[in-house]
Every structure is written in structure tokens, then in C-alpha cells.
Image (tube, helix red, strand yellow):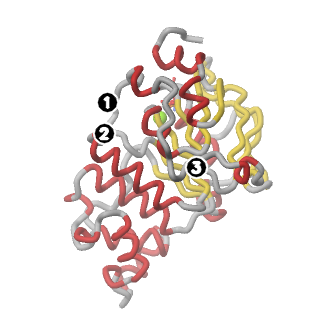
Amino acid sequence: MTPTSHTLYPSSSALGEGSSESREEGVWTQEIANASPALRVVNLTKRFGGLAAVDNLNLTVRRGATHCIIGPNGAGKSTFFDLVTNVQPTTAGDVYFFGERINGLPPYRCSGLGIARKFQAPTLFPELTAAENLFLGKVGHLSWNRLLRTREIPAADEEVTGLLDRLRLAEQGGTRAAELSHGQQQWLEIGVALMARPRLLLLDEPTAGMSPRETEATAELLRELTGGTTTVIVEHDLAFVRRIADIITVMHRGQAVAEGSPDEIAQNALVRDVYLGRKSL
Ligand code: ADP
Ligand code: MG
């Protein structure tokens, strides 16, 4: 089941009244601001009939950044990921990955280049254990045979056990994915994506359907895990992304309407209006 119920807008308190809680990481440093682009989209557009789900979007994700994209439901966030990974063909515009134009490359080639994506809907193998799912993330989903024939035991693989630990799943290595809680499944999926050592990690609503405690743990976990991996996180929850983002882009109706540091975005009057529903742009 895909958890889809969430509030469209965060509460006004989530936006903070100019508060700037200290974040050890997630600071938009000059270093990252000057880093070369990992991902750049130029005039990117996707039309579904008369609807422009992504509408002339220009956006640059810097190498090493945790770049969050927020916006209300229907803003075009997931479609943006579809275009970057070529799950859907673009209507117009270009996508550059580390300087290389990747429009039209089949999705498996995108993943071969080092783009890993966690979808909104779960993609784990429910009958396999947490350790086995991670192991497949490492050797690739096309390597089922290797898992079946292998003498390597996923639960004994150092990388697997190390990551299980960091995912707070040390005790669950032998548990079937289907038996994990919703939050644990989401963390395991992030782990599967990371096992491929991607150059770009795309996470679509990693906290969807989570309890406040799980959401809290996810923010911590992402800060610990993503490290130097360039990560784009799509979310609707501004309070959550403020805690982990180096930079935030606000999408609305397929366009980027604001971009800045978490504090800048939280204090941006236009963003507040969009999020509080006072203005529909
Ligand atoms: P978000 O992820 O920000 O909630 P989406 O990218 O899923 O938004 O959707 C953006 C808009 O495009 C929505 O109005 C949605 O209904 C529409 N849309 C998305 N996918 C399709 C599709 N395959 N066919 C038609 N319309 C679509
Ligand atoms: Mg979406």
C-alpha cells in the first residue's frame, strides 16, 4: 500500500518565526555553493495533455549537496524525478548529469551512470530478508542468480551488516522485509539505494506515512548516511527538510518559485503564502 495521506500544508508553526535552530550539518556552505553541478536541468517541461506538470524548470543541484525540493501535492516533484531518470520522456528541455546530457537514456543506463532513486511506492522484495535486500542493492537487481547460487551470505557481508547497523536495523537483518514496520521498510529502501554507491541519490517523500518519531529518526539517519553523496529529496514537509537541507527549492505548478537556504525559505513571504494557502500564485 502506498501511503498517500498527508497534510497538504505544514502548520504555520512549522515554518518558524525566523527561528534558526542550530544544525550541525545541512548548512549551505560556500564550498557547496561553488561546487560543480551534479545535476542541471534546463527549461525542463513535461506536458500531460493540456497540463504542464513540469513547466520550464531550471534547477541546479551542486555536487555534495543535500538539496530538498518542496511543494504542495501536484507541484510536479515526482514528475521531475521521472524526467531525470527517464522513466517518462520529456516534452522539452534538457537534463545534464555531471555535464553529460542524458535525455532519452533508458532508465537502466541512468542507474548505470550512478543515479539511484527511491520511489514513493515500496520496491523491496518482501519475501527476502533485510540483509538480502541490501545485498541485492549491492550486486544489482539483475543478479538474482548470484544471490541464489552464491556462497556469500548476505547476513555475513560486512558492508551489509555495517549498513544495517547505521539504518537502525541491526536486529532485523534476518527479518523478511514484509514483516518490518513501515518506517523500517523506508529506511531499508534508502539503504538499498545507497548500496549501489550512487553519485546521485533521489528520494521521493522518504517520510510519507511515518509517525513523528520515525520522521525524526529519518532526519537523523539521512544526515548520517548521505554524507558526501549528492542527494535530492522531494518532500511536502517544510519542517522536516529544514533540518536536513543545504538548499531548498520550492516548486509550485511545475516551476521553481523560490530557492535558498532553509532559513531563507522559511522566512520567504511568497513561500509562506503558498504554503499557508493564502496565495495560489
Ligand atoms: P507531486 O509529486 O509534486 O505531488 P506529480 O509530479 O506527481 O506532483 O504531479 C504533477 C501533476 O501532473 C499533477 O497534476 C498530476 O495529476 C499530473 N500527473 C502526474 N503524472 C501524470 C500522468 N502519468 N498522467 C497525467 N497526469 C499526470
Ligand atoms: Mg509526488
Per the image, the residue denoted by label 2 is 209
Q: Is residue 27 above or below residue 161?
A: above
Q: Is residue 185 above or below residue 41?
A: below
Structural crowding at the residue carrying mark 3, measured as other residues with C-alpha within 10 Å and reported as few (<14), some (14–19) or many (≥20): many
Counting from the top left corner in percent of width and height, residue 5 is at 31, 30
C-alpha separation, residue under disc 2 versus residue under disc 3 = 22 Å
Residue in the picture at 35% in, 52% down: 186
Counting from the top left corner in percent of width and height, residue 270 is at 60, 17
Q: Nearer the viewer, residue 185 or 63?
A: 63
Of tags 3 and 1, the one toward the viewer is 3
Residue type (three-letter) at the residue carrying disc 2:
Gly
Question: In this view of the protein, can residue 202 be seen by the observer?
Answer: yes
Residue type (three-letter) at the residue carrying disc 1:
Ser
Say if mark 3 contacts mark 1, CB within 8 Å.
no
C-alpha separation, residue under disc 2 versus residue under disc 1 = 7 Å
Of tags 2 and 3, the one toward the viewer is 3
Say if mark 2 contacts mark 1, CB within 8 Å.
yes
C-alpha separation, residue under disc 3 versus residue under disc 1 = 25 Å
SS category of the residue bearing label 3? strand
Per the image, the residue denoted by label 1 is 5
Q: Nearer the viewer, residue 206 or 1?
A: 206
Counting from the top left corner in percent of width and height, residue 271 is at 56, 21
Counting from the top left corner in percent of width and height, residue 129 is at 27, 69
Residue in the picture at 65% in, 34% down: 260
Per the image, the residue denoted by label 3 is 66
User: In the picture, residue 6 is in which quadrant?
Assistant: top left
Give the number of marks: 3
Q: In this view, does 233 lie to the left or right of 44?
A: left
Tell which residue pokes out farthest to the bottom in this image: 151
